[in-house]
Structures are given as C-alpha cells and as structure tokens.
C-alpha cells in the first residue's frame, strides 16, 4: 500500500484548487535523428519510460536555408521554436556548462523538480551551435551528462537511458547498480 | 608534408633497435552486446576508426555458472581472463572512480600514452561487478566517461564514439566542435 502511494507521488502535483495535475516530461530537440541504430535506441528507452512517466518527444525540424544564415541567426530562430514548445514546464537545458550529476543524484534532481510543482519538466537539447540568449533566459537549470562532448544525436539516446535509469532508482528497482 | 609526418607519428613508436612498432588499441570487454542497436552503433564507430588506428575488440565470454559464484569469485575469474589478453600494452580501465576528461583532453591523453612508448593501449570495461584487485594492480590509468553510470553495454558504443572523436581532434578534422 505504501508503495502504491509513493508510485503515484512521482507523477502528480495538486493545483491551488487541489485538483490533481499529471506531471509529464517534454524532451525537445532539433532535427531528425539520422542513424537507424540511434533511432532504435531512443525508441527502446522511450518505450520503457512509458511505464513510469509520460514522455513527449518534440523534434523541431532543421531550419531551411540554414547555410545562408549566420550562427547567431540560427540560434535565434531555433530558440524561438524551442520557446514556442514550452507551456509552463520547468526548463532544463542539456548544456556543456551544466551541472554534472551521478545517476542517483540525477534521479533526486528529477524528484525535486517534480516536487517543486508546475506543469512538469521540459528537457532541451540545442542544435549544433547551442542555445540563444533567449533560451538561456527562460531556463531554470542547466545539466551536463558528461565532461565529454557527445554528438547532439547520440545524446538523445544516452539521455533517455539516464531518465529511465533515474525512474528505476526512484522506484527502488534493480536496473541500476552503481 | 608536415601533415603526413604528424599522421604517421600518431600510430608508431620505435623500439630499442629503431624498428618501427605499429601502435594499436585493444578494447577488452565482458559478455556479448545484447541489443541490436548497440551492436550496430559499435560497428559504425569501429568501422570509422579503421581509418585512424587499428582497434582490436576483444570480448571475453560471460562466465558459465556465474549464479553459483560469489561476486568476488566472478571478479577474480573475469580478472584472470582480462589479464590474459594483455601483452605489453598500457592498461587503461574505464572505472567509475577514473579521471574525467573533456573530449579534447581525452584526445591529448591518447596522444601522450602513445608517445610514452610500449606496444599500444588496452582499454578495459569490467563486468557487472567491476574489476578484481589483480586488474587494478596492473592498470596504468583509470578513466571515466561520465559521473553518471552507463550500462556496461552502452558504454562500449559511447567509448568508440569518443575514441573516433579523439582521433579526428588529433588530426584537426571537423567532426568535433565543442
């Protein structure tokens, strides 16, 4: 019985009228995943995540005519698209200067963010040139999965695996052993 | 011309009789890669690496009857297998307590290790329970790809991508931009 209460606690908050809000996670990225094995990897972990938390994967199409644009213009246009996908969630950027966590710390971070209320979490992976200043301004947190640079394609699969790992840690399930 | 000399420098040392030694990289891991998408990902980056440095991927079979063995026994038996695959290389463990690098620092680390001579490098990923004390004793370095725990299956693909990235950094090629 206690377990059931804890399970529910992960995914809901209450609004000011004590109505239940189902928390969900948005994952926003730019451009199609190119390689088939990375597509398959993302699907694998997204499927597993369904059992824990609703995850909406939002893919912003690559800019047309990007070659004619400056890096600043690309970041700005991509930034506007990113911001248009946010609707009240806490915004967490995957950023090279973000805070690094162990997997257990990352699961606690997700739990804390959920507990802080709001409409859930939006994790954002930028394009090849990073984020515009507008995106940095609306961000609540910046996290980093590694000191190493991962391709902005592969990081999607790695992130979903860590999110899945985090959920199993919060539920006390045996997938994770550090 | 200078470029050509630099390219060769990456991969060779000279022995005491000034004979050229072709450097190579061994990658030692335990157990088959289970998921098809991870197998495909490993193959992708191993194929790309062929153009830069010979990489030998050595997979030690999972122990039979592991369920009847204690964790210490498993680590010890796996450790003996690992040590049997080393023949004069510098041994670098992928270990949760290892040193973290940026991708650029990692490429410099590889270059330094190559320059130190010997017969090349052997990177080792342990089994589910980590390394035996015997393996730690023969190790020259310990590195970590992330503070986060990656599955010991996925880490193979992530490592090969970083190794490939490192090679392109050392050659000044455009794959990497941090």
Image (cartoon, coloured by chain):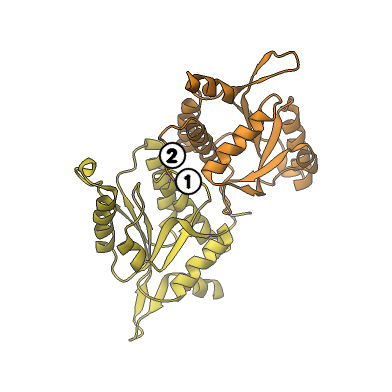
Chain colours: A orange, B yellow
**Which residue occupies the extreme front position in the image?**
A2
Image position, residue B39 (x, y; %): 37, 42
Residue for badge 2: A176
Residue at the image point whose x is 40% and y is 35% from the top:
A174
Comparing A88 with B2, the one in front is A88
> Regarding mark 1 in the picture, which secondary structure is present there?
loop
Q: Distance between the residues labelled 1 and 2?
A: 8 Å
Q: Nearer the viewer, residue A98 or A153?
A: A98
User: As rendered, which of B34 and B52 lies closer to the eye?
Assistant: B34
Using the image, name the chain to which the residue with label 2 belongs.
Answer: A
Mark 1 in CB contact with mark 2 (< 8 angstroms):
yes
Q: Is mark 2 on a helix, strand or loop?
A: loop
Residue at the image position 58 percent from the left and 46 percent from the top: A101
Task: Say whether residue A154 is left or right of residue B131.
Answer: right
Chain of the residue that carries numbered disc 1 in the rendered image: B
Q: Residue B142: x and y, percent?
A: 44, 62
Q: Residue at x 72, y 28 (%)?
A: A86
Q: Position of residue B162 (x, y in %)?
A: 50, 54
Residue pictured at 33% horizontal, 61% vertical:
B133
Q: Mark 1 points at which residue?
A: B149
Which corner quadrant of the image does residue B151 belong to? top left
Is there any visible trace of residue A47 in the rendered image?
yes
């Amino acid at each position: 019985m206690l377990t059931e209460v804890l399970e529910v606690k992960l995914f809901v908050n209450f609004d000011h009228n004590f109505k239940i809000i189902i928390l969900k996670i948005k994952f926003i990225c730019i451009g199609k995943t190119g390689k088939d094995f990375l597509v398959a990897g993302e699907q694998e972990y997204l499927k597993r995540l369904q059992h824990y938390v609703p995850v909406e994967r939002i893919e912003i199409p690559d800019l047309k005519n990007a070659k004619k644009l400056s890096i600043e213009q690309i970041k700005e246009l991509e930034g506007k698209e990113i911001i248009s996908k946010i609707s009240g969630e806490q915004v967490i950027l995957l950023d090279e200067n973000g805070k690094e966590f162990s997997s257990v710390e990352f699961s606690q971070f997700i739990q804390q963010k959920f507990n802080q209320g709001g409409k859930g979490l939006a994790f954002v992976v930028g394009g090849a040139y990073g984020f515009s200043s507008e995106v940095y301004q609306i961000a609540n947190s910046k996290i980093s999965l590694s000191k190493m640079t991962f391709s902005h394609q592969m990081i999607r699969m790695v992130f979903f695996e860590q999110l899945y790992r985090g959920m199993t840690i919060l539920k006390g399930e045996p997938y994770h052993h550090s």
